[in-house]
Image (tube, rainbow, N blue to C red):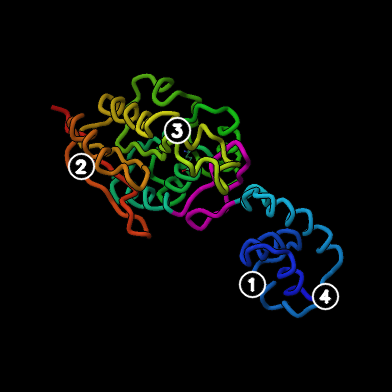
Amino acid sequence: MDYSALLLQSGLDKIDAQVLFSHCAGKNRAWLIGHGQDEVDPAHAKAFNPLAARRLAGEPVAYIVGTREFFGRDFVVNSSVLIPRPDTELLVELALERAGEGARVLDLGTGSGCIPITLKLERLDLDVSAVDLSPAALIVAQTNASQLDAAIRFFQSDWYQALGDACFDVIVSNPPYIEQNDHHLSEGDLRFEPRSALSDEGDGLVHIRSIISGASSRLSENGWLLFEHGWDQSAACRALLDAAGFDEVQSWRDLSGIERVTGGRWKAS
Ligand code: GLN
């Protein structure tokens, strides 16, 4: 049997099959595409079949191979952290545009650490801190920071609680914002991700309210708060920022045209 036939016969989505097979064979996808007609090495098939079975049972590819690419870098992931999403690259880009030279940046609910690590590696001048409530997530984030050589301060913290009176120029977050009864929580890859990283077990805005209310006392004059949210939450998020006294409140669209990030600028009165 050749490689193309093995992948086809697996019953997996084509890209999933290629990613899983490349992982087993220690090759990249380009190699696989170029060698589709080669006879399969039995050792590769033996390694591939159990991984294909896991994927067919629903487990996300990122957890099976243990990594996910974000902003051009590979991040270690496991079932203690949310799998980084391409949508979140928008949040990173907006923060990079707004962070001045040497800015102090805070990421709330860092998970795999994909946001602060990317910010630091794109801009070595930034002073980056990150928090997560979950010790298991912090282990993953610290592993990524050390493997990618990003100097970040990590804190185990319930949002701002462990940060004392530290002040920041940019605060970012991709918080759990899925409403508790959303059917997506019991579908697809989300079934395997930590529920506490996805849902606030409330109306979807519980953590966003906490993040906004704590930001005013921790942002420097003209500092930015930027956070990701659900497809239908942008108007509610803008209203919360307006009510809290933020200026320049606005939302930005992701690659699918959905308002995905909302933010505002803090003007101390
Ligand atoms: N900050 C991480 C990410 O964007 C984790 C977010 C989360 O767990 N809600 O991927």
Which label's residue is closer to the chain start, 2 or 3? 3
Residue range (magenta): 68-86
Residue beneath disc 2: 249
- Residue 269, by quadrant, is top left
Give how far apart the Cα atoms at labels 2 and 3 are: 27 Å
Separation of marks 4 and 3 at Cα, in angstroms: 47 Å
Q: Position of residue 14 (x, y in %)?
A: 63, 67
Q: Is residue 88 above or below residue 199?
A: below
The dot on residue 30 is 1
Circle 1: residue type: Ala
Q: Which residue is the site of mark 3?
A: 180
Q: Name the side, left or right, on which 60 lies relative to 243.
A: right
Q: Tell which circle, 4 or 2, labels the residue nearer the N-terminal end.
A: 4
Query: Which amino acid is tagged 4?
Result: Met
Numbered disc 3: secondary structure: loop
Q: Position of residue 48 (x, y in %)?
A: 77, 59
Q: How would you rate the neighbour count of disc 1 (Cα within 10 Å): few for under 14, some for 14-19, many for 20 or more?
A: few
Of the residues under marks 1 and 4, which one precedes in the sequence? 4
Residue at which label 4 appears: 1
The amino acid pointed to by label 2 is Val
The answer for how far apart the CA atoms under marks 4 and 2 are is 58 Å
Between 234 and 26, which is closer to the camera in this rendering? 234
Closest to the camera, between mark 2 and mark 3, is 3
CA gap between label 3 and label 1 equals 41 Å
Q: Residue at x 57, y 34 (%)?
A: 137
Q: Are marks 2 and 1 in contact (CB under 8 Å)?
A: no
Give the residue displayed 55% in from the left and 38% down from the top: 141
Q: Quadrant of residue 81?
A: top right
Q: Disc 4, ligand 1: is the CB inside 8 Å?
A: no
- Residues under labels 2 and 1: Cα distance? 44 Å
